[in-house]
Amino acid sequence: MDCLIWDQIDRQVVGYDDFRPGVVINQMVAKELKINKLPSVPEVLLKLVSACRKPQVILDEVVSIIQHDAALTARIFDIASTDFRLEKVDRENFKALVSGLGVDVISSIASSTAVDQFFSRFWSGTDQHIGLWRVSLECACLARALARAVDYPEPEEAYLAGLLHNLGRWVYLSEFPEEYASVGGSDQGEQDKLSYEKDLFGLSSVEYAASLTVGWTRDALLSDAVLFQNQSTMAVLDSPELIRLLNLACRLIASEPWEDKSVFDDADRLLGLNAGQVLEVRARAKTEQEEIIAGYGLQADATGDSGAKGIRKALSDHVHDSALVSAINIAASDDPWQAAISYFEVLSGVSEVAAFEYHQEDNLLHSGRFGSNVDGDRFKRLDIPVRSGRNLLAEACLMKSTISTLDEGLPPLTSVLHTQLQRIFGKQELLAMPVISGHEVLGLLVAGLDTREMEELLRYRSRLDYFLAVVAAQLRVHVAVGEDRVIAAESRVHEYVSRTRRLIHEANNPLGIVANYLQILSMKFEQDHDTQKQINVIKEEIDRVSGILTSLRGVPENIGNQTAIVDINNLLEEIVSIFRVSLFEPNGITCDLRLDRAIPEIHSVPSHLKQVITNLLKNSVEALESKGKGTIAVETNDAVYFDGRQCVRIVIADNGPGISQNVIDHLFTSAVSSKGAPHSGVGLMVVKSLVSEMGGNVLVYSREEEGARFEIFLPRG
């Protein structure tokens, strides 16, 4: 793409007589400007990476961090604007957008941005970049403070408008630092800067920012506010309140009220605020901005040299952690807990470590695995009750967080277990690391260290949390692999039983014919006693064969098909956690899991349901492999009516190439080759058969190049 054409806005801009839709950015650009390549403030980026690595991610924390960086916020809006899953989400509600995209998508954005900034031209944080960041935060805080002062119903919308008001300038500076170096001198006024940008690029930064944001909200009011931010007070006097809020916020940044008294008049005309209210709002916004900047370890007047080496080292550590931990393959081990210990030894250099597996039925941590430098005999009978206020290991499991004997604020612990473990390890400090999958504690690793070793290891706590998250996922894979083997064995037995029954039926037919002919022969040779005797021998042997075949019919036909109570949501979470590590992440696939927690447990066939979900997920992965990336949505809904029955609905959808019409016409028949399309073949015939056996129905929606959507309806009762 040699140029960028803005063809999304069809309005004449007040004050820009020469502006028109379709203006082409100067050919010197010679490349596409991409939102997903915009650099973020490294301190903000690393804080987001750390927040996404936690075993239990806090949505409000993630949203707050993202909203401190214009580039990250822009990426979220840009991705959300094209995500079909978010069609019904309120686009003006940024938290809802982040929640709809899901933690996996946000984590991928943070990690990919960190890797890009490390391996590409690393952004060292120029004074202009830092200056723009400070201005965007100040404008955001001002816009929100003004909104609250006039009781604007959506103050967060005003904040986002302020944060993104200089997005175009951020893009120009990031993509063309040399060309843009001459823009923004202290002797230039705002209109001079905009004119210079327009001469240089064909669009001013304000116009370009408006073109980027035009599709991010349904009513395009955000784009309007950005576009008209520098217009005169009279020009925007009749405009919607958001436009007036941002316009005044930009005016307050550009001038000092005590030097330019006209600002007070503008505030009164635009929002009905007096001079005292304006000064109060400005002071409150300035304090908030300084608190945000200080929260990232920076000073309010931070420059581009602040912590650049440290940030580069932190990004390097993140890339290193991701590469190292992704190589772990605990699931392939016969003893996954022992494998986890071995990997911990490699990553930390600590050999005084042991593993405890949590058994929910007796609420105990069971010992049995230990590191290479531990006397295992002393661990064999060390089973620990998980009770509050007793010991470090139980406390870590209850808190679902890694804790150490060096941590401050620990509750009083009464057990002598600490001393016992210190004696076993021969170390004075203990580190308890619970392994958690979702909200379930799988077990715990405990390590003994010297004080100096502990302090060094705790410096990389985020790396430790990342390692434990991977261990949890791999343990889930290991369990699931075992379950899959059982399901596969049950499937083979079922297939054997069905084949045997068919063979018995086929064998009995000719045996019956032979028996009939023997009866005819017996009647013909009724007087020939020797012949009768021989015929009777043959009849006895045929009866014996028939008896053997009849006894084989005693093999139960419902092996592996037992009905049981099924928690559909838990089943889906387990299967998705397996696919996430084994197939989704290696293929660049994100999974959006939306589960209706109101769904009750239902009577169904667990093995059938697992096979159905597995087949559909595998089909989606195969469909997305050609793209090298994509999204799979997994959703459940309670109390859905199908054909007059109340059902539970399970939805599995992908944004792959879809299913061609000639395939979809015969989708659930064996006539369709599995080589013909991503969603074809024997697998879907099996899906249809198994769902029917569970008393359910399957629906499919698909268009070529738009993905495929499978809906399974199971009886709720």
Image (cartoon, grey):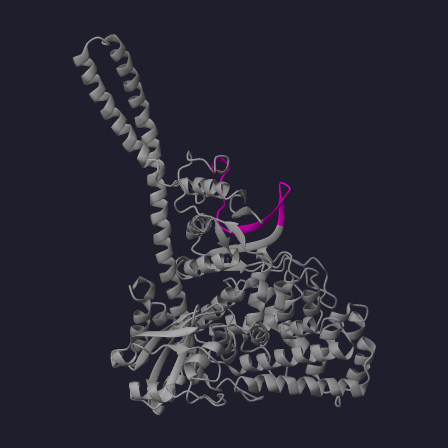
How many numbered marks, from 0 up? 0
Q: Specify whether residue 287 is in view.
A: yes
Left or right? Give the position of 41 relative to 529. Answer: right
* Percent position of residue 691, x then y: 49, 43
Q: Residue at x 56, y 60 (%)?
A: 4
Residue found farthest to the left: 530
The quadrant holding residue 346 is bottom left
Does residue 328 sit above or below 306 in this rendering? above
Nearest the viewer among 635 and 311 is 635
Does residue 663 sit above or below 410 in this rendering? above
The quadrant holding residue 117 is bottom left
Q: Specify whether residue 319 is in view.
A: no
* Percent position of residue 22, x then y: 63, 57
* Percent position of residue 490, x then y: 36, 47
Does residue 511 sit above or below 289 in this rendering? above
Nearest the viewer among 567 and 150 is 567
Q: Residue at x 63, y 46 (%)?
A: 641
Left or right? Give the position of 337 relative to 442. Answer: left
Nearest the viewer among 92 and 407 is 407
Does residue 657 sit above or below 104 in this rendering? above
Left or right? Give the position of 554 relative to 287. Answer: left
Left or right? Give the position of 540 relative to 243. Answer: left
* Percent position of residue 329, x then y: 33, 65
Q: Residue at x 35, y 34 (%)?
A: 501
- Residue 468 falls inside the magenta stretch: no
Magenta-drawn segment: 640-663
